[in-house]
Amino acid sequence: MVALEVVGDGAGEPYASPTTWSEWIRFVDAAAPQLAGEGPFSEEERLDYHSQFVVLSTPGMDEISLALRRLMILNRRHDGTARRGLIVSGPPTTGKTTALQQLGRAFHLAERRRRGSETDEGRLPVAFVAVPPAATAKMLVSEFARFLGLPVAARMNQAQITDAVVGTLRDLGTGLVLVDDIHLLDTRTRAGAETSDQMKYLSERVAPPSSTPESPLRTRPC
């Protein structure tokens, strides 16, 4: 069986999954699609416009947002142990990744508004990574490093990469960490169990930012 991945016909800018810092900021700052001028528009312009899908709020997204707001309130002063997390589960193609990304974008933009700035001013409110296939604990933390733009030398061990990631997330005031595709972790295997433990270890070491008591997710995301 041959699997084909449709990546487009080359028109316009290519889509990049927001799994690096620069790609995430590009995703957050993306303007709503619109046609320039009053027309008439060419077929190519109309096709390009309609290919830029607009994400609408759904009851499922509202439910996830409410659960996330409650957890962030509970995690405000939660020190010493792993903070509470939220797992979004469902059948394939039901919009789990889309919901996570849109919640992350809403949090990121709301944090800017709370700070009264149109830029991040050296901060990164949200980190978004995807679990790679057959991931090991070192591979997972390396994905965090790649998202943050941290160089990972071949001689660096897992603990050294983790220290660099944790220090950077703290310095950037990251308040929300989104991890996609965790279904790829098979905790029945040694590698999967160790990777799951690595996620717990990260949640224990990444302290909540000072802005958490005034979390923008306490209000409905736009």
Image (cartoon, grey):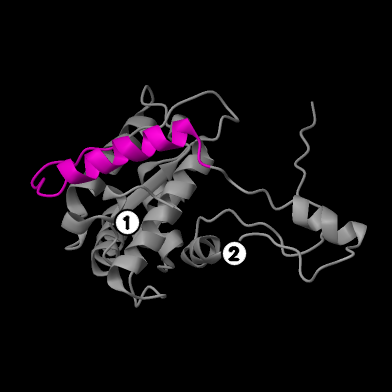
Residue matched to label 2: 31
| Magenta segment | 57-85
- Quadrant where the N terminus lies? top right
Q: Which mark is residue 146?
A: none
Helix, strand or loop for disc 1: loop
Residue at image coords 45%, 61%: 146
Disc 1 packing (10 Å; few <14; some 14–19; many ≥20): few
Would you place residue 186 above or below residue 57 in this image?
above
Residue 221 in magenta stretch: no
Q: Secondary structure at mark 2?
A: loop
Residue 186: x, y in percent? 42, 27
Q: Position of residue 190 (x, y in %)?
A: 35, 29
Left-right relation of 96 to 221:
right
Give yes or no for residue 79 being in the magenta stretch: yes
In the displayed structure image, the side of residue 57 where residue 179 appears, left or right: left
Residue drawn at 41 percent across, 32 percent down: 88
Disc 2 residue type (three-letter): Ala
Residue 220: tell me if it is visible.
yes
Q: Amino acid at mark 1?
A: Asn
Q: Which residue is mark 1?
A: 157
Give me the residue at 45% from left, 60% from top. 147
